[in-house]
């Protein structure tokens, strides 16, 4: 963010992974279901795409930018995994729609940022220069609605087993705290963890 490194087409925090850095912190600290939902859906799919097919652009210091890119993306990926297997987070259909609507709103914000800055945030202006899943899709703007439908379908498949509410996949957690006086059990449907 130093003045000599500032480039409005690349420096604004408008990529989904930029937002996920703050979302992951908020989800892990507050454990609020709406933040957890964004981390779950965006982190396990959109961020994973950035990990599998990175679009790396080094402007000043390649080693520092390499470490920055991979550490942030991998930590967000780890956080998305931790909320499911560590916190016991289970998405609902309401949270599916919240995450999907938020992704669409973020795309509009990134699209406005692209128009104003000339950038390619969210790869909404054109496909990335590096290899990605977008390469097998039609050219801009036709790939944008296709990606929207694909993401919605994948997220629905991610939600379905948890939302069925059978067996261990219910949207609850239970833990027992043992104190010197007496053990007590806490049950909750509001948050993903104590």
Image (tube, rainbow, N blue to C red):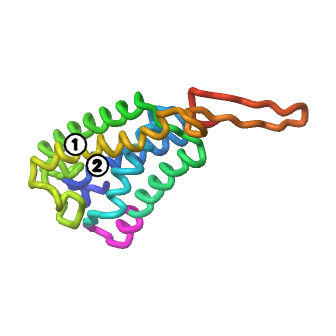
- Left or right of residue 135, residue 56 in this image: right
* CA neighbours of label 1 inside 10 A, class few (<14), some (14 to 19), many (20+): many
* CA neighbours of label 2 inside 10 A, class few (<14), some (14 to 19), many (20+): many
From the top left corner, tell me how far across and down residue 167 is, in percent.
59, 37
Kindly identify which residue carries mark 2.
Answer: 15
Quadrant where the N terminus is found in the figure: bottom left
Quarter of the image for residue 98 reads top left
Q: Nearer the viewer, residue 47 or 2?
A: 47
Mark 2 touches mark 1? (CB < 8 Å): yes
Q: At x 71% / y 37%, what residue is drawn?
A: 175
Quarter of the image for residue 174 reads top right
Please say if 69 is above or below 159.
Answer: below
From the top left corner, tell me how far across and down residue 44 is, in percent.
41, 50
From the top left corner, tell me how far across and down residue 25 is, in percent.
49, 44
Q: At x 59% / y 27%, what residue is drawn?
A: 189
Q: Tell me if residue 152 is in the magenta stretch.
A: no
SS label for mark 1: helix
Q: Tell me where the magenta segment starts and ends, as one range.
A: 58-69
Quadrant where the C terminus is found in the figure: top right
Q: Nearer the viewer, residue 154 or 145?
A: 154
Count of labels shown? 2
Q: At x 36% / y 51%, what residue is drawn?
A: 45
Q: CA distance from mark 2 to mark 1?
A: 7 Å
The circle on residue 110 is: 1
Q: At x 46% / y 45%, what residue is drawn?
A: 24
- Left or right of residue 173, residue 55 in this image: left
Q: Residue furthest right?
A: 181
| Magenta: main secondary structure | helix
Q: Tell me if residue 65 is in the magenta stretch.
A: yes
Q: Nearer the viewer, residue 32 or 155?
A: 155
- Left or right of residue 137, residue 151 in this image: right
């Amino acid at each position: 963010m130093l003045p000599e490194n500032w480039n409005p087409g690349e420096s604004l925090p408008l990529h989904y992974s930029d937002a996920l850095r703050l979302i992951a912190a908020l989800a892990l600290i507050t454990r609020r279901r709406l933040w957890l939902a964004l981390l779950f859906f965006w982190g396990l799919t959109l961020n994973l795409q950035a990990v599998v097919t990175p679009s790396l652009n080094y402007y000043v210091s390649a080693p520092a930018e390499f470490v920055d890119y991979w550490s942030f993306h991998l930590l967000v990926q780890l956080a998305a995994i931790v909320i499911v297997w560590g916190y016991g987070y289970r998405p609902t259909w309401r949270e599916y729609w919240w995450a999907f609507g938020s992704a669409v709103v973020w795309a509009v914000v990134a699209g406005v940022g692209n128009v104003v800055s000339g950038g390619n945030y969210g790869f909404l202006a054109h496909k990335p220069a590096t290899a990605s899943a977008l390469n097998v899709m039609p050219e801009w703007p036709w790939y944008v609605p296709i990606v929207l439908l694909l993401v919605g379908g994948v997220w629905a498949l991610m939600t379905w087993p948890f939302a069925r509410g059978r067996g261990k996949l219910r949207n609850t957690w239970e833990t027992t705290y043992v104190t010197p006086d007496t053990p007590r059990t806490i049950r909750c449907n509001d948050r993903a963890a104590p």
